[in-house]
Amino acid sequence: MSFLKAEWRKLAFINYAIDKAFLQDYVPYGTELDLWEGKCYVSLIGFRFINTRLLGIRIPFHTDFEEVNLRFYVKRLVGAEWRRGVVFIKEMVPKPALTFVANTVYREKYETLPMQHAWHENEETRTVEYKWRKKKQWQSLKVTAGKKAIPIEAGSESAFITEHYWGYAPVTATKSNQYEVTHPQWLQYPVSNTELSVDFELTYGPTFEFLNNCQPASVMLAEGSEITIENKQLIQ
């Protein structure tokens, strides 16, 4: 049985190409940075969990909620197969029970904060916005896109960003957790406008303050799908 089943919907990606030196201390044991055309990416992502079930059980008041995370991309060679995955700098959710389970079981870096979302559509566009409050300051990311979903081109930057199907988290200097994330290939909406109000130093610490002065390399809005998160395995 999968550890968690849910839907991830309306995923807004703000992608930055950065110097990989910023991430070296965050790379879990047994993995290495995964680059696209020689570029190292971090992504700020906002989305909604919907119809969430933990070990097949719907937990009251914990089925639908927002998440915003900052993540980067790694890979691990297993036999002849490269397992391409993500590592989270931090994941923000509005429910303390979610933070407790994720941090305790998966050794992730969740934080509980007040959060909001807004999805709007008109005849031509859709807009998604995700907000969180840190130290009494509201932060937000907002993306406006076309209404028609289109395929993500194989081999593209968008495919690289969305098609990492493993999660990795450091445990010690010589141990890491890995877990599989399953979902079909996603569709995306062509983005026409982006509004960001984010203090990266406040939200993610001094190491990522430099992102306050960076322009995104790209912005995406993916529809998402049903997903599963499988049980963790220890790498050592």
Image: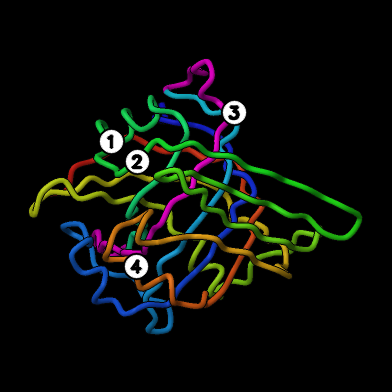
In this figure, which residue is indicated by the disc labeled 4?
Answer: 209
Tell me: 117 left or right of 103.
right
Q: Mark 1 or mark 2, which is nearer the start of the sequence?
A: 1
Q: Amino acid at mark 4?
A: Glu
Element carrying mark 1:
helix
Q: Is 143 placed above or below 54 here?
A: below
Q: Is 104 placed above or below 74 here?
A: above
- Quarter of the image with the N terminus in it: top left
Give the farthest residue toward the left: 174
Q: Mark 4 or mark 3, which is nearer the start of the sequence?
A: 3
Nearer the observer: mark 1 or 3; the answer is 1
In this figure, which residue is indicated by the disc labeled 2?
Answer: 110
Is the Cβ of the residue at disc 2 closer than 8 Å to that at disc 1? yes
Q: Mark 3 or mark 2, which is nearer the start of the sequence?
A: 3
Q: Amino acid at mark 3?
A: Asn
Q: Which residues are magenta?
A: 55-81
In this figure, which residue is indicated by the disc labeled 3?
Answer: 51
In this figure, which residue is indicated by the disc labeled 1?
Answer: 103
Give the farthest residue toward the front: 136
Mark 3–mark 4 distance (CA, rounded to whole Å): 35 Å
Element carrying mark 4:
helix
Element carrying mark 3:
strand
Which residue is depicted at the point 34% across and 67% down? 209
Tell me: 180 left or right of 139.
left
Is the Cβ of the residue at disc 2 closer than 8 Å to that at disc 3? no
Q: Which mark is residue 129?
A: none
